[in-house]
Image (cartoon, rainbow, N blue to C red):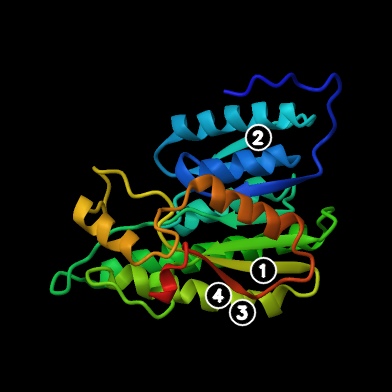
Amino acid sequence: MSTAQPPATTRAPIGRALVTGASKRVGRATAIELARAGLDLALTYRTDEAGCRETAARAVAAARESGFAIAPEILHLDLCEIASVERAAAALAPRGVDCIVHNASTYAPTAMGSMTAVDFESMYRAEVVSPALLTQALRGALAQSRLPAGGAVVFYSDIYALGKPRVSFTPYIVAKAAVRALAEQLTVELAPAVRVHCIAPGVIAWPDDDAPGAVSDEIKRSTLARTPLARAGTPEEAAKLVRFLVLDASYLTGVTIRIDGGRALR
């Protein structure tokens, strides 16, 4: 925990960011990093409300240390349910947003031979359809952003969807490939007022041992052996990339950036 003393005075936020899936890991780190930079927050969760509230509390403390006073909004959002997306958009619109970080994702293996239409449809809805509709609903607010570089939208694809297919993840990989196409399409749809970015991570912290997609120690060793930097990334490293894209990358849009320690090269 930081021991730094908060500034004597606090400033109003410089803007407002929507971070989906903010209860833990990359979503939590991103919320804290953006709060530290002076952005107020709207944070969403699907099942872990307590985790999302913990993220909000940590973000408030990080913002205070940087001299900003923020009041995060917490919303329930189930990306598999269009009605939930519509409710969230209606709630967010009155206060506006300057950027959206589409972090929420469904990561789970589906073995060949057991795939169903529901597997594909639910994954595609969560990764592509709902983020597209949410961005569309908030495009007016994004276009009026007060951030120096203007509004921004950040999507997450995956390095395995960029030419490195992975066994037993077909619905997930296909949906993540479509995320990149969506980001490129929205780049031209929302220009010039809004920049759109796509991040393709490799291993950014391993899945929890009891989570879908958890991997064995043997697979971890094998993966790191093919990663030039020889380690997994951290949520904080991903969060810093998001901060750069949102606040500093004023002439960057429509590009997919790998954050994978060089894994895509091997």
Residue type highlighted by circle 1: Val
Give the CA distance from mark 2 to mark 3. 30 Å
At horizontal 54% and vertical 49% (from top left) the residue drawn is 20
- Tag 2 or tag 1, which sits nearer the N-term? 2
Dot 3 falls on a residue whose secondary structure is helix
At horizontal 18% and vertical 68% (from top left) the residue drawn is 111
Give the CA distance from mark 4 to mark 3. 5 Å
Residue type highlighted by circle 3: Gln
In the rendered image of this protein, does residue 31 appear above or below residue 262? Answer: above
Q: Which residue is mark 3?
A: 185
State whether residue 51 appears in this view. yes
- Tag 3 or tag 2, which sits nearer the N-term? 2
At horizontal 55% and vertical 53% (from top left) the residue drawn is 238
Residue 9 rendering spot, x and y as whole percentages? 86, 22
- Tag 3 or tag 1, which sits nearer the N-term? 3
In the rendered image of this protein, does residue 238 appear above or below residue 113? Answer: above
Question: Relative to 44, is 171 on the left or the right?
Answer: left
Dot 1 falls on a residue whose secondary structure is strand
Residue 63 rendering spot, x and y as whole percentages? 71, 32
Give the CA distance from mark 1 to mark 2. 23 Å
Q: Residues within 10 Å of mark 1 (few under 14, many from 20)?
A: many
At horizontal 74% and vertical 63% (from top left) the residue drawn is 249
Residue 112 rendering spot, x and y as whole percentages? 17, 74
Q: Which residue is mark 1?
A: 196
Q: Which residue is mark 4?
A: 182
Most foreground residue, 69 or 242: 242
Asked whether disc 4 touches disc 3, contact meaning CB atoms under 8 Å apart, the reply is yes
Give the quadrant of the C terminus. bottom left
